[in-house]
Image (cartoon, rainbow, N blue to C red):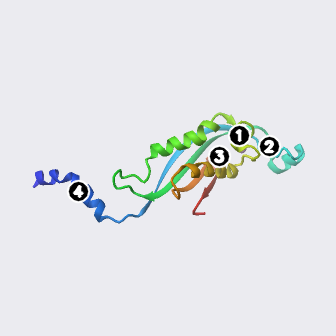
């Protein structure tokens, strides 16, 4: 019987796929980058910026962590919802290569005019990723600014 089981190994995968239900599954990829920023509205005076943003109005940096969650059904051929290496490539091409070791207040054309809070950055990252990923697959983007602070954008919130 042991030989029989081994011979049937390939078809067992197909049989199980046919028999199983197809729940939606979440998968996630985390990437990190280092960047500087300054919370400052150039249309306001130094005093007003200091009042609104305190010491965050001064140029400083963060070790950011970006977590991207994708939702979908499992592809029965690959066993993946989405190949996370592909998701990593998308995150790096659209975001990390533009923001890593940059000043987010001055160096990134697609962040121009934005006060680079974690909230605003999360929305900007969400929009770039959503345009490149399969329709409806992007579930959430969470940006950790420090190990205590994060902002999240998603279809579920
Ligand atoms: Ni900051």
Q: Which residue is mark 4?
A: 12
> Separation of disc 1 and disc 2 at Cα?
20 Å
Question: Which of the 4 image quadrants contains residue 156?
Answer: bottom right
4 or 1: mark nearer the eye: 1
> Separation of disc 4 and disc 1 at Cα?
52 Å
- Quarter of the render that holds ligand 1: top right
Q: Earlier in the sequence, mark 4 or mark 1?
A: 4
Question: Judging from the image, what secondary structure is the residue with disc 1 in?
Answer: helix
State if disc 3 and disc 2 touch (CB < 8 Å).
Answer: no
Query: What mark, if any, has residue 109 been given in the picture?
Result: 1
Q: Earlier in the sequence, mark 3 or mark 1?
A: 1
Question: Judging from the image, what secondary structure is the residue with disc 2 in?
Answer: helix
For the view shown, which residue lies furthest in the top direction? 101
Query: What mark, if any, has residue 145 been given in the picture?
Result: 3
Residue 149 in sight: no
Q: Which residue is mark 2?
A: 57
Q: Confirm or reject: label 3 Cβ below 8 Å from ligand 1.
A: yes
Relative image position of residue 18 (x, y in whole percent): 29, 62
Question: Which of the 4 image quadrants contains residue 5?
Answer: bottom left
Relative image position of residue 129 (x, y in whole percent): 58, 49
> Separation of disc 3 and disc 1 at Cα?
20 Å
């Amino acid at each position: 019987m042991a030989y029989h089981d081994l011979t049937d190994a390939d078809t067992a995968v197909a049989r199980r796929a046919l028999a199983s239900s197809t729940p939606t599954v979440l998968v996630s990829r985390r990437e990190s980058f280092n960047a500087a920023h300054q919370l400052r509205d150039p249309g306001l005076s130094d005093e007003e910026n200091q009042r609104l943003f305190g010491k965050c109005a001064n140029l400083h940096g963060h070790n950011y962590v970006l977590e991207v969650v994708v939702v979908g059904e499992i592809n029965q051929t690959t066993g993946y919802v989405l190949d996370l290496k592909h998701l990593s490539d998308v995150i790096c091409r659209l975001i990390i290569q533009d923001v890593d070791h940059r000043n987010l207040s001055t160096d990134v054309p697609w962040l121009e005019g934005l006060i680079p809070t974690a909230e605003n950055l999360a929305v900007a990252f969400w929009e770039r990723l959503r345009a490149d990923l399969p329709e409806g697959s992007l579930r959430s983007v969470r940006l950790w600014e420090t190990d205590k602070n994060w902002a999240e954008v998603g279809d579920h919130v």
